[in-house]
Amino acid sequence: MTQPIADPRPLTVGDERIVDVGPIADGQPATTSVAYSPPMMLLTMLLATVAGVLIVLGAAGLIRDRRARTPGSVPPAPAP
């Protein structure tokens, strides 16, 4: 398997660049690929994870609040 042809410029934060990728098998054409900045990818994944957790917590809070207001529902246990 061939390695991508390296660009001498290093990636900076927020940078993306199109790089040439050699053929995977003999007789196949070379292709291009997009190289993204690793710190920005990590930040994006972290922010997406935090957003997902906040959505789940918000939905759970809404469901809990709705169940507490429903007539005939089981009241919460008294605090000791």
Image (cartoon, rainbow, N blue to C red):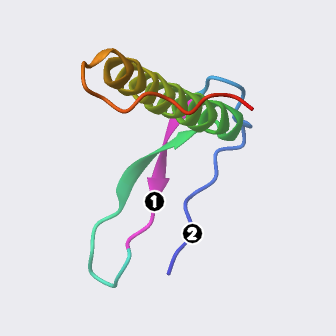
User: Residue 51: image x %, image y %?
Assistant: 51, 26
User: Residue 19: image x %, image y %?
Assistant: 50, 46
Q: Nearer the viewer, residue 34 or 80?
A: 80
Secondary structure beneath label 1: strand
Please determine whether, in this image, residue 27 is positioned above or below residue 45: below
Residue occupying the point 75% across, 32% down = 80
Q: CA distance from mark 1 to mark 2?
A: 7 Å
Q: Main secondary structure of the magenta part?
A: strand
User: Residue 59: image x %, image y %?
Assistant: 39, 26
Secondary structure beneath label 2: loop
Q: Nearer the viewer, residue 52 or 19?
A: 52
Q: Nearer the viewer, residue 70 or 23?
A: 70
Q: Quadrant location of residue 30? A: bottom left
Q: Which mark is residue 3?
A: 2
Q: Quadrant location of residue 46? A: top right
Residue occupying the point 74% across, 37% down = 10
Q: Amino acid at mark 2?
A: Gln
Q: Quadrant location of residue 35? A: top right
Please determine whether, in this image, residue 24 is positioned above or below residue 22: below
Please determine whether, in this image, residue 76 is positioned above or below residue 30: above
Relative horizontal placement of residue 55, taking residue 41 as reference (left or right): left
Q: Which mark is residue 21?
A: 1
Pick whichever of labels 1 and 2 is earlier in the sequence.
2
Q: Is residue 37 magenta?
A: no
Relative horizontal placement of residue 61, taking residue 7 as reference (left or right): left
Relative horizontal placement of residue 79, taking residue 19 as reference (left or right): right
Contact flag, marks 1 and 2 (Cβ < 8 Å):
no
Please determine whether, in this image, residue 8 is positioned above or below residue 73: below
Query: Start and end of the magenta stretch?
Result: 16-23
Q: Amino acid at mark 1?
A: Val
